[in-house]
Image (cartoon, rainbow, N blue to C red):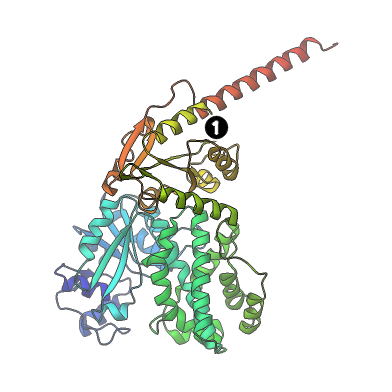
């Protein structure tokens, strides 16, 4: 209702639907929402009990229902939604059985729609008061995200865009679990130091899982990640934070939920979080501790002792030798100049499995386009989860091979399809290079001020051809061996 009011005041025609007719009747009659008693609902907003009529001739369909009802609501609406309809989802959660995010749930029920995730630090209580707020619209096609950005942007709402839908939604779901932990710590009487530690290390857990799945690291440091986590783990408006506080005070989890009086999405998200941690083999100690307290009867104070008593770790995400190497390379690169002009940086991407002279030719020609060549190599997780490709060599082995090529100055991991835009800025790239079998696919990077070059492949060689030839050779050898065995059989 806070969003409905905001959109109405921005000049849009807004209609509200609910599965509960009594709720609609109360809203229509009082022009008040019970959890936002000081917010007046504009007379221009209409209410409609028919979901069929709600889906007719609308620019945007906004899903703002609890995560546990997203699938049933989408199923109910599916037959009335037209091809290409933009659906904006503000529900935050992960379906326990399927591990789908809310936009994925909606897409599975309404495949003809374009489902945009809208997420960020946006408590309804402050949106209802017209306090300055920021949020992120995420969709794979940036132009669709920009349409939503245009509609939702107004003097009190600033909207950013992102293409990492999975990352944005993962942040929205998992930050609620960390907010529960933050609330529990306050309920136990712990202070700001504890809360800051939970927020910081909680974000590290979310990012660790997200990157393993294939999300962009910068998503977790943005509004949907850090921003939403901070507000949810600290605000008096946060139902997850309040629920955690009551649990820290000694309430049974179900009593705490009842006291809060609203849906506590963090508790709903715990089973999926635990399943994802196991599936992707990611250590998530804070979330595991919250799970132990809420679902397995662990004593909160004892759980904290166990959490604090874990083996000592480092904050560094990479081995120190790798970090020192990359730092030294980048430092030397900034000191190098060519004439009066700054060094020109080139980047290329690939798997680089079974390194061959075709790869060397590509790297040589890429380096010739500038002074400093960065090579982004697909990580093992990215190859398996997104490219559906299994490599002969591991990422670290492929990285060592490419680093040994004299044309290459720096090797970095490619962990998702979407990171190319951010890499252009993070590494100050001047020229983006790929083989001409990708011609036209990356022209959108020109929008980032980068020259895009497609180089001809070495025609007589490719990794796929090598693998094919080796397989054929092995098959022939096996066939010949079998034939010889038959001919020499004494029978």
Quick check: 451 above or below 80? above
Mark 1, Cα crowd under 10 Å, few <14 / some 14-19 / many 20+, is some
**On the rendered structure, is 469 left or right of 210?**
right
Between residue 308 and residue 129, name the one nearer to us.
308
Q: Write down the residue under mark 1.
A: 355
Residue 230 % position (x, y): 42, 75
Q: Give the residue at x 33% y 71%.
A: 19
Residue 388 versus residue 112: which sits nearer the camera? 388
Q: Is residue 415 visible?
A: no
- Say if 184 sits above or below 313 in the image: below
Circle 1 — which element? Answer: loop
Residue 4, percent across and down?
A: 23, 72
**Relative to residue 36, is residue 53 depicted above or below?**
above
Q: Residue at x 55, y 59 (%)?
A: 317
Do we see residue 3 in this rendering? yes
Residue 102 lies left or right of residue 466; in this view the side is: left
Q: State the quadrant of the C terminus.
A: top right
Q: Nearer the viewer, residue 103 or 77?
A: 103
Q: Nearer the viewer, residue 6 or 254?
A: 6
Does residue 398 lie above or below 196 as drawn? above
Indicate the quadrant containing the N terminus: top left, top right, bottom left or bottom right: bottom left
């Amino acid at each position: 209702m806070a969003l409905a009011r905001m959109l109405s005041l921005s000049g849009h025609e807004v209609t509200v639907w609910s599965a509960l007719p009594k709720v609609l009747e109360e809203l229509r009659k009082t022009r008040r929402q019970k959890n936002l008693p000081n917010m007046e609902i504009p007379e221009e907003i209409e209410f409609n009990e028919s979901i069929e009529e709600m889906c007719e001739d609308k620019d945007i369909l906004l899903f703002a229902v609890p995560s546990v009802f997203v699938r049933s609501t989408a199923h109910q609406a599916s037959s009335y939604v037209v091809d290409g309809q933009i659906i904006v989802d503000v529900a935050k959660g992960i379906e326990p059985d399927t591990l789908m995010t809310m936009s994925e749930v909606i897409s599975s029920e309404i495949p003809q729609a374009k489902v945009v995730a809208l997420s960020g630090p946006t408590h309804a209580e402050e949106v209802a008061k017209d306090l300055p707020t920021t949020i992120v619209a995420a969709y794979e096609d940036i132009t669709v995200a920009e349409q939503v950005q245009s509609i939702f942007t107004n003097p009190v709402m600033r909207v950013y865009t992102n293409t990492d839908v999975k990352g944005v939604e993962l942040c929205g779901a998992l930050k609620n679990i960390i907010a529960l932990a933050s609330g529990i710590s306050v309920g136990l009487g712990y202070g700001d130091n504890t809360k800051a530690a939970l927020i910081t290390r909680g974000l590290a857990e979310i990012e660790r899982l997200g990157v393993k799945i294939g999300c962009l690291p910068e998503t977790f440091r943005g509004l949907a990640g850090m921003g939403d986590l901070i507000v949810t783990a600290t605000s008096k408006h946060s139902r997850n934070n309040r629920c955690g506080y009551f649990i820290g005070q000694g309430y049974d989890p179900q009593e705490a939920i009842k006291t809060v009086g609203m849906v506590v999405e963090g508790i709903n998200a715990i089973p999926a979080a635990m399943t994802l941690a196991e599936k992707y083999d990611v250590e998530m100690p804070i979330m595991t501790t919250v799970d132990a307290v809420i679902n397995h009867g662990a004593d909160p104070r004892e759980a904290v002792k166990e959490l604090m008593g874990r083996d000592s770790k480092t904050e560094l995400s990479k081995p120190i030798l790798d970090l020192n190497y990359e730092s030294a390379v980048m430092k030397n690169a900034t000191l190098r100049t060519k004439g009066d002009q700054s060094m020109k940086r080139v980047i290329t991407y690939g798997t680089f499995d079974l390194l061959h002279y075709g790869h060397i030719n590509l790297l040589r020609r890429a380096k010739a386009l500038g002074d400093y060549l960065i090579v982004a190599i697909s990580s093992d997780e990215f190859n398996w989860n997104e490219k559906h490709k299994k490599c002969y060599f591991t990422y670290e082995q492929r990285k060592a091979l490419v680093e040994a090529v004299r044309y290459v100055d720096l090797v970095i991991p490619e962990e998702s399809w979407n990171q190319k835009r951010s890499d252009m800025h993070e590494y100050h790239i001047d020229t983006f290079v790929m083989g001409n079998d990708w011609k036209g696919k990356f022209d959108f990077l020109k929008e980032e001020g980068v020259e895009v070059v497609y180089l001809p492949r070495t025609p007589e060689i490719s990794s796929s051809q090598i693998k094919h030839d080796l397989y054929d050779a092995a098959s022939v050898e096996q066939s010949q061996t079998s034939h010889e065995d038959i001919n020499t059989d004494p029978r």
